[in-house]
Amino acid sequence: MNPIYNFSAGPAVLPRPVLERAQAEMLDWQGTGLSVMEMSHRGADFRAIAAQAEADLRRLLAIPAHYKVLFLQGGAHSQFAMIPLNLLRGRSQADYVDTGDWSLKAIAEAQRFAKVNVVASSAASNYTTIPALDTWQCSSQAAYLHYTSNETIRGVEFQHTPMVGEVPLVADMSSDILSRPIDIECFGLIYAGAQKNIGPAGLTLVIVREDLVGAASPETPSMFNYHNYATTESMYNTPPTYAWYIAGLVFQWLLEQGGLQAMAAQNQRKAAKLYAAIDQSGLYHNPVDPAYRSWMNIPFTLADASLEQRFLAEAAQVGLLNLKGHRALGGMRASLYNAMPEAGVDALIELMQDFADKVGG
């Protein structure tokens, strides 16, 4: 039987050792006789789990002490509203970069609360590139500048942090956080839904500089106020405890792999292999500007679109699952998050080559 490789964009593949440990601890966490799912979030056992998870994340990302780490709910969609509510701090304008579908969602939500200045957009290229930084029309009146570091749907990714001066930089890193080292001090705030590179759906991570917490707009609902989580160790209400626990196991696994430098080398190698297979074939095509191709999400099409369903069926037969592209674009999409082993990428490339040979591509 072929091994199963899950290329889903999210909820996505988790490291097998993490799943095996969670399985072993499902009914009895470390001799307590309880599953983590049954623990009080205010009890000593879960607080120990939560503290270890935060400590390991801080170690992985080298998070300075003057940044708060918040474990929240609501996904990136809630953050689209929470960010302007918390970070405008008396200003009326925010800068946003438009590089695709998730940027557009963030912009639309922010427009409920602020005047949004779109400093740059790649719409004219059908979101296949990122506008050069020296063309961005940033405003000195902006409370912050928001960008999406990796557009999951179209496979466009910033390969370097855009440096924009003194305005706090806000990044949606839902699909590429923990894929490589980053300099946290370049950012005012980073947020990420967990279900791609962190853990299961239901958890949302926010890393925010302390000086940006505590000045939320007066109309901010209490559940949307960062201050309430920063002052209660993310336990203002009952947090997503089991998702938090799994995230902690993922952080431990990443440390065991050698940390984010090791993951970056592996992720770059995996992506380079797959892009090479696409580019060297007459059958497959990826439209993204090579300078901004994502390491995490690689969309591709077939020269003959009528062959796509056959390709997906043959992929499923050999255990390569969830390769269907986003419904807005069609085609295929391979998501190569940290937990996707290199053997999975090799198996996909082998299938692509065999398929091309059969259909004459």
Image (spheres, grey):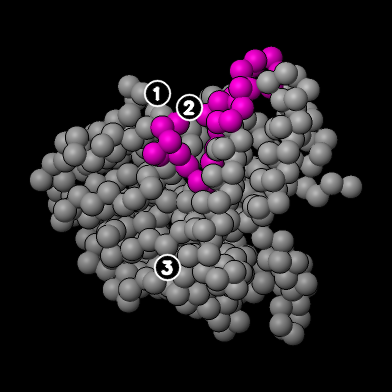
Q: Amino acid at mark 3?
A: Leu
Above or below residue 119? Residue 39 is below
For disc 3, the neighbor class at 10 Å (few under 14, some 14 to 19, many from 20) is some
- Decide if residue 56 is in sight here: yes
> Residue 194, percent across and down?
53, 55
Name which residue lies at 55% across and 81% down.
48
Mark 3 vs mark 2, foreground winner is 2
Instruction: Residue under label 2, please give it.
Output: 287
Front residue (pair 112, 243): 243
Q: Earlier in the sequence, mark 1 or mark 3?
A: 3
Name which residue lies at 66% across and 52% down.
342
Name which residue lies at 33% across and 63% down.
183
Q: Are marks 2 and 1 in contact (CB under 8 Å)?
A: yes
Front residue (pair 237, 206): 206
> Residue 276, percent across and down?
57, 37
Q: SS of the residue at dot 2?
A: loop
Residue at mark 3 to residue at mark 2: CA–CA distance:
32 Å
Instruction: Residue under label 3, please give it.
Output: 61
Q: SS of the residue at dot 3?
A: helix
Instruction: Residue under label 1, please give it.
Output: 126
Residue at mark 1 to residue at mark 3: CA–CA distance:
33 Å
Q: Earlier in the sequence, mark 2 or mark 1?
A: 1
Q: Please give left or right for residue 319 compared with residue 199 in the image.
A: right
Q: Are marks 3 and 2 in contact (CB under 8 Å)?
A: no
- 285 in magenta: yes
- 176 in magenta: no
Q: SS of the residue at dot 1?
A: loop
Magenta-highlighted residues: 279-308
